[in-house]
Amino acid sequence: MNYNKKPRIVAYLLSLTFLVTTSLCQPSKNDYFIIAAELGLFLYTQYGMHTNAPDNLSEKKPNSFDDKMRDILKWDGNEKIAANYSDIFLYGFFVGSIPISPLLSKNNYMDLLLTNLEVLSINGLVTNMVKHKVKRQRPYSFYDTFPDNEDSYRSFFSGHTSTAFAIGTSTALSLTRNTELNERLIWGSFITSAILTGYLRIAADKHYTTDVIAGGIIGTLVGSFVKKRNVDRFKQNHHISFKNNELFIRVRL
């Protein structure tokens, strides 16, 4: 991700969504503080941490596999277009689905919305901490496709890809259990879109293939873990249902 170009309004919208959600469904105090802390740490690592070039930069060259895949998949001369397409997939489809996809659920909108927020936060926190620790140089920086910036040493692993797979996995698991939509259609839509997001990051010269593969694996694991952990966790604190087009919330005190 190019953090310099991402509007800070994303952080404000995520925070607002969290506050509105928790005010409506009234989670337990532990849930509130845990998710608030996760979201806060994620936003800090997203916008407040800067990664400098490693001391042994000259020794960190791409492996032959990544080098060959870059030659095959990169959009020569159209890297910025590929980057824009990857942003559309990530923010328009995956991040945009956080408040929208739970609307398809039969009776637990707030449960799914809170889970989506937590998936985004935990995955973002893990991704950013690894990026900051590894400090892998992005291909556009190594090959001088574009000028260096503070985002140049955050290549491993792909944040776009990990986020796409994390939200996609969590949402697909939720929708297959809580809607009557076709299971193959749900999984096919999210997996295809997540793979395309990863591919576009390589085409944009933002990531190597191994960055994208690792991001897909980590994102899938995070999405599965958080979703399964929250199945019973929120159920103990609140229940939400729709009846006669009105929203009813029953809170277990």
Image (cartoon, helix red, strand yellow):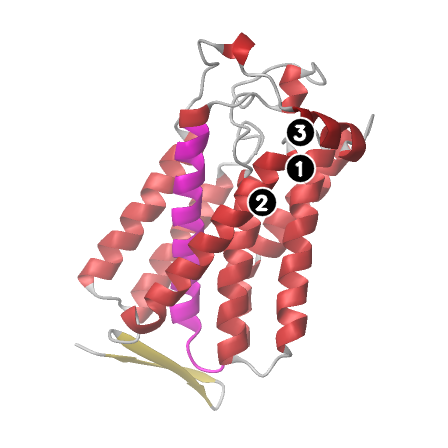
Tell me: 164 left or right of 118.
right
Name the residue: 32% across, 79% down: 239
Q: Residue furthest right?
A: 77
Q: Quadrant of the N terminus?
A: top right
Q: Residues within 10 Å of mark 3 (few under 14, many from 20)?
A: some
Type of the residue with mark 1? Arg
Q: Which residue is mark 2?
A: 161
Of tags 3 and 2, which is closer to the observer?
3
Residue closer to the observer: 220 or 40: 220
- Residue 172 found in image quarter: bottom right
Q: Which residue is mark 1?
A: 201
Mark 2–mark 1 CB contact (< 8 Å): yes
- The segment highlighted magenta reads 105-132
| Label 2 or label 1, whichever comes before in sequence order | 2
| Residue 17 visible in image | no
Identify which amino acid the numbered label 3 is placed on. Answer: Asp
Q: What's the residue type where badge 2 is placed?
A: Thr
Q: 67 and 55: which one is in front?
A: 67
Secondary structure of the residue carrying numbered label 1: helix
SS assignment at label 2: helix
Side of 224 where 235 appears, left or right: left
Give the farthest residue toward the bottom: 244
Q: Is residue 120 magenta?
A: yes
Residue placed most toward the observer, 224 or 101: 224
Look at 52% across and 65% down and name the residue there. Answer: 171
| Rendered location of residue 132, percent (x, y) | 42, 27
